[in-house]
Image: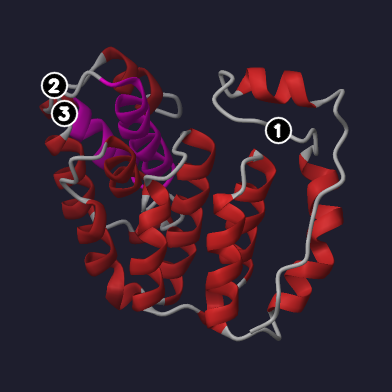
Amino acid sequence: MEKLDFTFTGNPENAPAMAHYMKDRFVFLGVKSPDRRAQSKPLLQASRQADLATIHTWIKRLYAREQREYQYLALDLAEYNVSRWQFADIVIFKQFVTQKSWWDSVDHWGTVFGKYIQRHPEQKAAIFQLFYQSPNLWERRIALTLQLKEKDAVDTTMLTQAILFDQYTDEFFIQKAIGWALRQYSKFAPDWVMQFLNTHQLSNLAVREASKYL
């Protein structure tokens, strides 16, 4: 296994504003996204030659670090290597959704899982079941937003199940996700989304988000 010998060089002047943007939930080094990508590019490229067990170890160790930029790097590694993952890897990654959870990391995991099901559409239902009806709101947000990249291949039964399970959940990040999922699908099936809105009682937030392109 290759040792993970990597540290970011941050700008402390950026850190307070970055932390404040995340409601001061996390400590930041002050590495903004373009600089983070530039600094981590060699590691990401090297990961293509690393075995999968090594990458899993890197992701776990990066996630354990205090500064938020290292969780972002862990996510970048997972996304960068998405073509190499199998279902068992996704099951392992599921644990991170509920660790140090906030919308930034959860939605990036959603991107990883969304890209995975694009490559493995036959596993979409199995991935959905990992998160559907979870007692954890962040996992249910994944169930709602899992198909954001599916365009006109959205499984409307899955989407409907996820929405109806949380139809009356009084939680901003859930209602926002309901609206987001419907808004995205409305780009490809506006009539379906309009019919859904007309036949289901949803929160004002969800309806406002869902109706943006209608």
| Label annotation for residue 28 | 1
Q: Is residue 48 left or right of residue 82?
A: right
Q: Residue 179 sits in which quadrant? A: top left
Q: Nearer the viewer, residue 65 or 73?
A: 65
Q: Are marks 2 and 3 in contact (CB under 8 Å)?
A: yes
Query: Which residue shows up at 53% across the image and 71% down it?
Result: 56
Query: Which residue shows up at 42% across the image and 41% down it?
Result: 184
Numbered marks: total: 3
Three-letter code, disc 2: Gln
Three-letter code, disc 1: Phe
Q: CA distance from mark 2 to mark 3?
A: 8 Å
- Residue at image mark 3: 167
The vertical placement of 83 against 169, above or below, is below
Q: Residue 23 sits in which quadrant? A: top right
Task: Please tell me whether the stretch drawn in magenta is mainly helix, strand or loop.
Answer: helix
Circle 2 — which element? Answer: loop
Q: Are marks 3 and 1 in contact (CB under 8 Å)?
A: no
* Magenta span includes 184: yes
Q: Quadrant of the N terminus?
A: bottom right
- Residue at image mark 2: 201
Q: Quadrant of the C terminus?
A: top left
Three-letter code, disc 3: Gln
Query: Which residue shows up at 69% across the image and 43% down it?
Result: 69
The vertical placement of 88 against 37, above or below, is below
Query: Which residue shows up at 69% across the image and 81% down it?
Result: 2
Q: Earlier in the sequence, mark 2 or mark 1?
A: 1
Disc 2 or disc 3, which is closer to the eye? 3
